[in-house]
Amino acid sequence: MVNQKVYILGNDDMVIMFGLIGIEGMIIDNSEDLITIFEDLISDKSIGMIIITIELNEAQISYFLNFKLNNKRPFVYIIPTIFNEEAEEEVFLKKYKDILEPVNKRG
């Protein structure tokens, strides 16, 4: 089995926190650059998982949902911002409950 890296894209706090345990990452100051940076990363075959820890807009959420549904590699994990008091209300799955419910009922 090939060793694959985990990579994090997010705000400075999260990238530094993950860096303390040896996970490489990039601080994203402008979320508009996120898709471009992500597309560069997915071409790197050594990356097996990308963690995203910044607030996403609707277009970005749709992009990543589509990517996750149509690609096996790399695995993309989106962590909602933990520094936002309303984070539980903005969880990724709640926004797309109507799309994901039929998928869950199939199993």
Image (tube, rainbow, N blue to C red):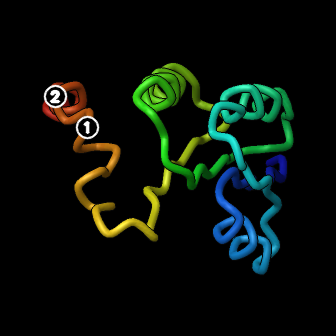
Front position in the image: 40 or 86: 86
**Which dot marks residue 95?**
1
The residue located at (69%, 50%) in the rendering is 9
Task: Tell me if residue 46 comes above or below residue 53 in the rendering.
Answer: above
The quarter of the picture where residue 65 lies is top left
Q: Quadrant of the C terminus?
A: top left
Residue 15, by quadrant, is bottom right
- Left or right: where 49 falls relative to 79: right
Crowd band around label 1 with a 10 angstrom C-alpha radius: few (<14), some (14–19), many (20+): few
- Name the amino acid type tagged 1: Lys
Q: Is residue 27 above or below residue 74?
A: below
Q: Position of residue 16 (x, y in %)?
A: 75, 72
How many labels sit on residues? 2
Q: Position of residue 73 (x, y in %)?
A: 65, 33
The residue that appears at 28% across and 62% down in the rendered structure is 86
Looking at numbered disc 2 in the image, what kind of residue is underneath it?
A: Asp
> Comparing marks 2 and 1, which lies closer to the viewer?
1
Residue of label 2: 98
CB contact under 8 Å: marks 2 and 1: no
Q: Please tell me whether residue 81 is drawn above or below residue 38 in the rendered image.
A: below
Q: Give the residue at x 40% y 29%.
A: 58
66 and 54: which one is in front?
54
Tag 2 secondary structure: helix
